[in-house]
Amino acid sequence: MGSRNLAGISLIVMAAGFVGCLFLPENNWTFLLIGGFEAGLVGGLADWFAVTALFRHPLGLRIPHTSLLLKNKGRIVDSLVSAMETQLLNKESITEQLRKLNLIQAAAQMLTRVVARKRTRQQVLDFAAETIAKLPLEKAVEPVRDAAANYIRGVDAAGLADRALTKVLNDGYEIKLFDYALNEAKAWAQRPETKDTMGALAMDQLSNAKVGGFTGFAFQAFAGMVNEDKLGSMIQTMLVAGVDSLLDPYGEQRLAILREVRVKLFEAAGDEEKLEYLRGQVLEVLHEQATEAFILNNLEKLREFALAKTAEERAKGGRIVFRLYAAVMRNMASEPERIQLWEDKTRGAIVQIAEQNHYRIGQLVRDNVDRMDDKQLVELLEEKIGQDLQWIRVNGAVCGFLVGIVLSLIQLI
């Protein structure tokens, strides 16, 4: 049974009881009941009038001091907005409530629960893969080239050359490069086709050589005793022997050549003019069309690698996402001062936003109330608090009935 119907029934009961008692024989009990029902009827009607007067004019009569809520709607809204702006959403109350919360810790706990889900980690990797696939790499070529050019312009060429030379000499790269060149030369000299080539070249030079006198006679005699094969074998043997002598770690010629190489390296590292020239050459190469294609091609390879790794990690359940997240959390936990700083900044930002926009909440309340007509506003209020107000009417009738019996009993006494 609805509370509004219950309130009406209470009035009907009081009225019916009062009328019914008028037909009963006159005695003390009838007197008490008439007094009770009469007072209950008066109390119920009085409370009905009071409750109705809050929302509308009772019976449609414009009695003074009725329809109080509608008459004072503007003042009520102003008071509500003022209370929200000055009390509910002021800086002190918001700050006090925020001090009770560990915003960063709460956010981290919530994020941990989210990242712990396999589906969430896979969605993160899906989003990462989609983003990587859509990256406009052709637009990244110019920034990469500019970054490289700026680095080259700003680098200390002399210092870089000195460090590079120190690394080369400490690790013996000049020796390794020298030995590599000698071994390649030896391998080339030992080839059969090298012997044939050297023999043919030597015979051609001997036949075209013009030497007079006794020396010329001896030279021609030597040329007549050899052929391309013999001459090629001789030259090949001398070449291999010469390379072997240079491969000897303690050979004088080898040591002399290496000393000369090191001297030239030191001279090159200290020649600022040559270093600047080299810097300019590198910058020119950077702005060539081939360099642009080279950068774009390597960026594409990098994209393919990233997509492959993303797909691989997704198949494993996205554990890399959780590992990265855990690493970030451990790093944060190791610096409580930074967490506290973020906490303070977050609180300050929320307080600032609330201070700057709390009037908007009040304005929103005002606008929503203004959009309602009187009927809608009354229906809204009655829906929210009408049940309690109707019980006031019921309580008024019941209390009036009891008070009436007490007063009638006092009259009898």
Image (cartoon, rainbow, N blue to C red):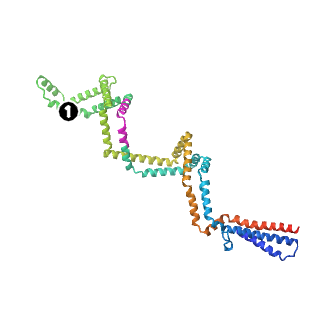
Camera sees residue 268: yes
What segment is highlighted magenta in the picture? 147-166
Q: Residue at x 80, y 71 (%)?
A: 38
Q: Quadrant of residue 219?
A: top left
Mark 1: few, some, or many residues within 10 Å (few <14, many ≥20)?
some
Q: Where, by quadrant of the figure, is residue 279 drawn?
A: top left
Front one among 192 and 77: 77
Q: Nearer the viewer, residue 190 or 182?
A: 182
Question: What residue is disc 1 on?
Answer: 201
Q: Is residue 317 above or below residue 4?
A: above
**Nearest to the observer: residue 2 or residue 258:** 2
Q: Is residue 24 left or right of residue 244?
A: right
Q: Residue at x 38, y 45 (%)?
A: 144
The single residue placed furthest to the front in the displayed view is 64
Residue visible at 29% across and 27% down?
243
From the top left corner, tell me how far across and down residue 151 is, in percent.
Answer: 37, 39
Q: Main secondary structure of the magenta part?
A: helix
Q: Position of residue 202 (x, y in %)?
A: 19, 31
**Residue 24 vs residue 228: left or right?**
right
- Residue nearest the observer in this picture, 20 or 110: 20
Residue 4, given in percent of the width and then of the height, sits at 70, 69
Quarter in which the C terminus is drawn: bottom right
Residue 289: x %, y % from top left: 31, 46
Type of the residue with mark 1: Leu
**The N terminus: image quadrant:** bottom right
- Residue drawn 73% across and 65% down? 392
Question: Number of callouts in the render?
Answer: 1
**Label 1: element kind:** helix
